[in-house]
Image (cartoon, grey):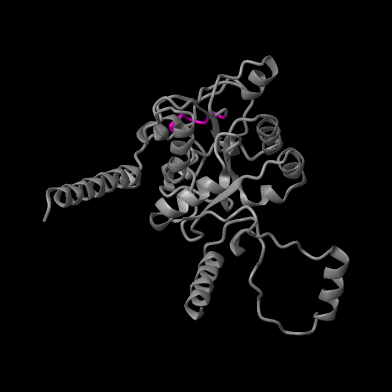
Amino acid sequence: MTSNGSREITKKKKNKTTTTRKNRKLLEHLSLKATTTTPSKSSSHPFDVDASDHCETPFQAYKDIEPFLFRIALSLKKTKASLKIYDPYFCEGSAKEHLKRLGFESVHNVNEDFYENVKKNTIPEYDVLLTNPPYSSDHFKRILNFCGASEKPFFLLLPNFVCRKTYYANEITSRKKEPLFLIPDELKPYRYWAPGRKGFEERAKGTTPFITFWYLEFGDAIDKNEIRGWWLKKYSPHSRCELPAPEESLPQQQRLQKRSNPNKRRREKAQNKNILKEPREKSGSIYYDPNVAQKKKRKKLESKERV
């Protein structure tokens, strides 16, 4: 073998080792485990709050979006540590701790009134907005209005029904924004911890009031199709999430089916009054039902096997 051939083999081995090391670096966040960062009691807030809104986002949800935050940092020529992340809704501060464990150290999540800051135009400088907003009142509409009017990327953890609402179309779709949906396995939904709420201190696994997933909008920072292709290649084999293409329909378990109108339901009830019927599985509910999720998962696997 010539010296040139030997050098070529050595170079290929070195490149392969470098690639392996890079891939291992990309996936190292997957091995991190959740730690207790949320206090058992809720703290006071300098603004009006609804106690039912106090639900801390699980560490797993942040792990799932780590690759996308990483890519935004790269596109801005920043490190993970210097990427400025803004979470406008403060619960108990675990968001900052979770993100820090993943390498994101410049996180603004402070016990302050987000809407007052908007009013006074004192929103901190940020690269990406990331939050799980309160569910009560009109918080969904207000955060979508803020994000829709901004050119910055935003990652919102919202219930599946939000994308079907008129206010979503008005604030997001009409402004030519088309977020990707990062959807966790229906059998392993995100579970939220409610500090200080009666009864929840005994529920170590937290609560899952709704089916939720991430709404990912990248603005001008990066092309959504490019980042989706990158994620599918690098992370999809190791992830428990799905990332449908923008033109694809949502997975079956995320679709909402409208009930028939009241008059039609009354007619159907009258027609079937004396007919014995088996109980029907509830379909299209906005609430998370583990039994329904299990059945849908099984049907999905069976259909794949037939193909």
Could you say which quadrant of the image residue 52 lies in?
A: top right
Depth order, front residue of 226/218: 226
Question: In the image, what residue occupies the spot 51% across and 59% down?
Answer: 186
Q: Is residue 290 visible?
A: yes
**Image position of 271 (left or right of 155):** right
Above or below residue 97? Residue 187 is below
- Predominant SS along the magenta part: loop
Q: Is residue 214 visible?
A: no
Which stretch did the figure color magenta?
89-94
Tally of marks: 0
Give percent across and percent down for residue 73.
Answer: 45, 32
Question: In the image, what residue occupies the spot 27% across and 48% down?
Answer: 20
**Image position of 267 (left or right of 215):** right
Above or below residue 25? Residue 48 is above
Give percent across and percent down for residue 89.
Answer: 57, 30
Above or below residue 16? Residue 185 is below
Depth order, front residue of 6/258: 6
Give percent across and percent down for residue 207.
Answer: 50, 49
**Does the magenta run of residues contain 90?**
yes
